[in-house]
Image (cartoon, coloured by chain):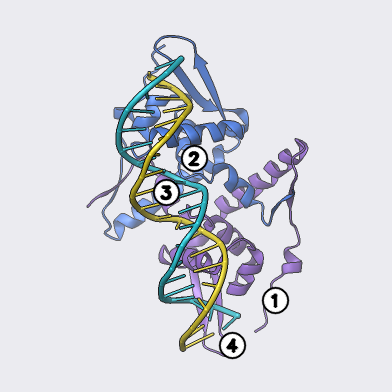
Chain colours: A purple, B blue, C yellow, D cyan
Amino acid sequence: MQKVYNIAVEATLEVIGGKWKPVILCHLNHHGKIRTNEFRRLIPGISQKMLTSQLRELEQDGLIDRKVFNQVPPKVEYSLTSYGQGMEPILSMLCSWGEKHIELLQDKGEAVLLRKNDEDISIQHTS
Amino acid sequence: MQKVYNIAVEATLEVIGGKWKPVILCHLNHHGKIRTNEFRRLIPGISQKMLTSQLRELEQDGLIDRKVFNQVPPKVEYSLTSYGQGMEPILSMLCSWGEKHIELLQDKGEAVLLRKNDEDISIQHTS
DNA sequence: CTGTATCCGTGTGGATACTG
DNA sequence: CAGTATCCACACGGATACAG
């Protein structure tokens, strides 16, 4: 069975088309390494199930790396692989386009807000 | 009710996050103006319903323009607005990333194929 | 040719509980 | 802390028919 794409972007969407994948990738692009619970704080809307499945798929497609520390309590760190880092320019543009779009919406009087307190939610790299 | 984004890319996804939207935008980016039936040939997998709804949403968000010709038989042309053209770099990168990814999959022996016969399906700008 | 309306199946994704 | 396993609802999206 031959899989046929009619336009190349369809292949891209199969990899990053998931509901939360660009969000996950953008956070990784910002922070480098992120632990599971940190993701849950960075992405309040996501459920445990979705988070895991999206991460697994990204891992399967070779975009992210999953590093397990054998310790108690458990610790798992996710990061972009070198292949995943190839998405960096796209991720950055998606983010900056969003920033400008939010400003546009605000100028039009819509009640939208961008939270900037990444640091409050924050990443602690406690080893 | 205040809409809150936790990261800017979320706003981008609300605009181009639809299942077919990046595909539609990429085609517009390639061809300039596209008629409804041409979309159906360019995107064989899409249903009439989906095509219309995705186009409407893109129009609502100001990315594409819908030009209706009052004639028989009816004719409607879609194109990127100037705001939509601001997505051009992103669309191009999404496409070229996909091309490279398809090559990678092929190198790994997966049965994937990119159709290049845009011209067979082709756009006729019959006035 | 372009678009709307309806019906309806499916799979995405949420809530919850549980394991290592 | 990290992850799996169910259950299940609802919205997404397909098929079909019809209208301008």
Foreground tag (2 vs 3): 2
Q: Residues within 10 Å of mark 1 (few under 14, many from 20)?
A: few
State the residue in front, B83 or B52.
Answer: B52
In the image, taking residue B85 as reference, residue D18 lies left or right, namely left
Q: Please name the residue shown 58% across and 57% down the image.
A: A23
Q: Amino acid at mark 4?
A: Pro
Q: Which image quadrant: the C terminus of chain B?
A: top left
Eyeballing the image, is B124 above or below B7? above
Q: How far apart are labels 3 and 1 at the CA level?
A: 35 Å
State the residue in front, B37 or A79.
Answer: B37
Foreground tag (4 vs 1): 4
What is the total number of numbered labels drawn onto the structure image? 4
Q: How far apart are labels 4 and 1 at the CA level?
A: 15 Å
Q: Please name the residue shown 43% across and 14% down the image.
A: B74
Q: Amino acid at mark 3?
A: Gly
Q: Which residue is mark 4?
A: A73
Q: Position of residue C18 (x, y in %)?
A: 49, 83
Q: Are marks 1 and 2 in contact (CB under 8 Å)?
A: no
Q: Amino acid at mark 2?
A: Lys
Q: Position of residue B108 (x, y in %)?
A: 30, 61
Q: Position of residue B14 (x, y in %)?
A: 59, 45
Q: How far apart are labels 4 and 2 at the CA level?
A: 43 Å
Q: Which residue is mark 2?
A: B21
Q: Which residue is mark 1?
A: A124
Q: Position of residue B28 (x, y in %)?
A: 48, 31
Q: Are marks 2 and 3 in contact (CB under 8 Å)?
A: no
Sequence-first tag of 4 and 1 = 4
- The answer to whether tags 1 and 2 share a subunit is no
SS at mark 3 in the image: helix
Residue extending farthest to the top is B71
Q: Are marks 4 and 1 in contact (CB under 8 Å)?
A: no
